[in-house]
Amino acid sequence: EDVKKQMEHYENEFLRNPKYFYVTMDIRDPPDKERLVKIYSTVIGLGGFKEVTANQAWDQVAQIVSEGSISNVFEIYKKYLFHYEKAFGPKTALKLSMEKDDVAIEDLDPSYLLPVKVFDVSKVSDITPEMIKEALTHDVCIFRNFEKATGFNKRMFTVESVYKNHSGEKIDVITQDPDVKTFHRINISREKWKLKKYIEYQRQQTNVDENGNIKFAVNIDMGHWKAEFDEIISKVPEELLCGSEKDVLQYVRQSVLGVNLPQMYIKVKGAWTGGHEENLRYRAANINHGPGASEWYCVGAK
């Protein structure tokens, strides 16, 4: 009964709805609606298109729906179900309007999100020169379990440790709207705070002010934090390490903050960095110290 209702909803509210004709004109007679609904329900159950793609879980979807090819189910979803999810997904629908956001649901391209190469490592010997060489052929990749594999001392980079050892540092803090969805430049305020003050702000029960804005600690220079910098130098492979013998920037005559000297960002929920090219168009290595997850959106060089 639920499958039948979902099929009717897909047919009447999406395929035959004039609002979505722009994206449904070529799919108004899908081959097997019951099969599509099964795929859709499975993907939504796993968190939606974005989560399934980010977690490389399309093989799991293919197994659940008995679809032989991972690429088949991925392409089927992009063609027939992506825009349906963005319009009606119970948790992943996007409330977009041309008037407010300069983009509407029907303008979204289902090819915007592609699986990213993930290197699973369990010990330092897993990170071989061949793996690094392959990693550098990708626009973006992830080394999963890097900290455990290399023995990277994550405790040195916790908020508690930073508060204890560097609370007097003066840092830049910006005010931003956590709900902004576009790349439009907006007016933001920038302040100088002591690191201690920001961490105390982060620990508050709520981080949203009366105007709905939040604070984000940005571009915290840590090249002079000897213990933390030494830990980075000793654990990050030299092919990925700023200032190493494998880094062409070792030849520059002065340090470039955030390029060949590391920087840290401290966030609260909803903090974001707008779209940008990496500094000097060089590759960047990012380590998420937690405890929360962070999402990166990357545009391929091509």
Image (cartoon, rainbow, N blue to C red):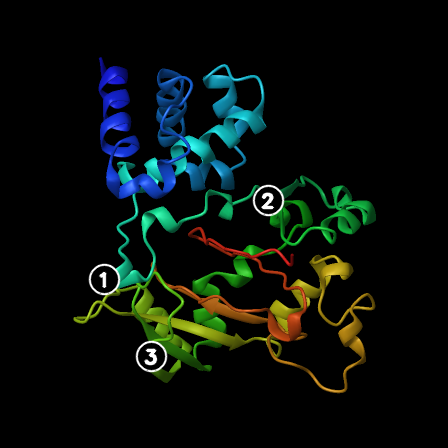
Return the x and y of residue 176 as percentages of the image width and height.
32, 71
244 and 80: which is toward the camera: 80
Please state which amino acid type lies under the numbered disc 3.
Ile
Which one is earlier in the sequence, the residue at label 1 or at label 2? 2
Q: Secondary structure at mark 1?
A: loop
Nearest the viewer among 198 and 35 is: 35
Tell me the mark number nearer the camera, choosing from 1 and 3. Answer: 3
Q: Nearer the viewer, residue 85 or 97?
A: 97
The residue to which callout 3 is attached is: 188
**Amino acid found under the numbered disc labelled 2:** Val
Q: Identify which residue, 40 or 254, lies in the foreground.
A: 40
Query: Splitting the image into 4 quarters, where does residue 7 fall?
Result: top left
Quadrant including the N terminus: top left
Q: Identify the residue position indicated by label 1 in the image.
A: 206
Q: Is residue 24 visible?
A: yes
Within the image, what quadrant is residue 10 found in? top left
Residue 180 image point, x, y percent: 32, 64
Relative horizontal placement of residue 4, taking residue 125 as reference (left or right):
left
Marks 1, 2: nearer the viewer: 2
Q: At x 46% / y 35%, what residue is drawn?
A: 78
Of callouts 1 and 3, the N-terminal one: 3
Query: Helix or strand or loop: what does disc 2 sit on?
Result: loop
Residue at position x 26%, y 65% in the image = 207
Which quadrant is the C terminus positioned in? bottom right
256 relative position to 193: left or right: right
- Residue drawn at the location 52% of the way across and 62% of the way down: 157
Q: Are there few (<14), some (14-19), or many (20+) residues within 10 Å of tag 1?
A: few
Return the disc, 3 or 2, that comes first in the chain's sequence: 2
Residue that label 2 marks: 116
Residue 27's image quarter? top left
Q: The residue under label 1 is which amino acid type?
A: Thr
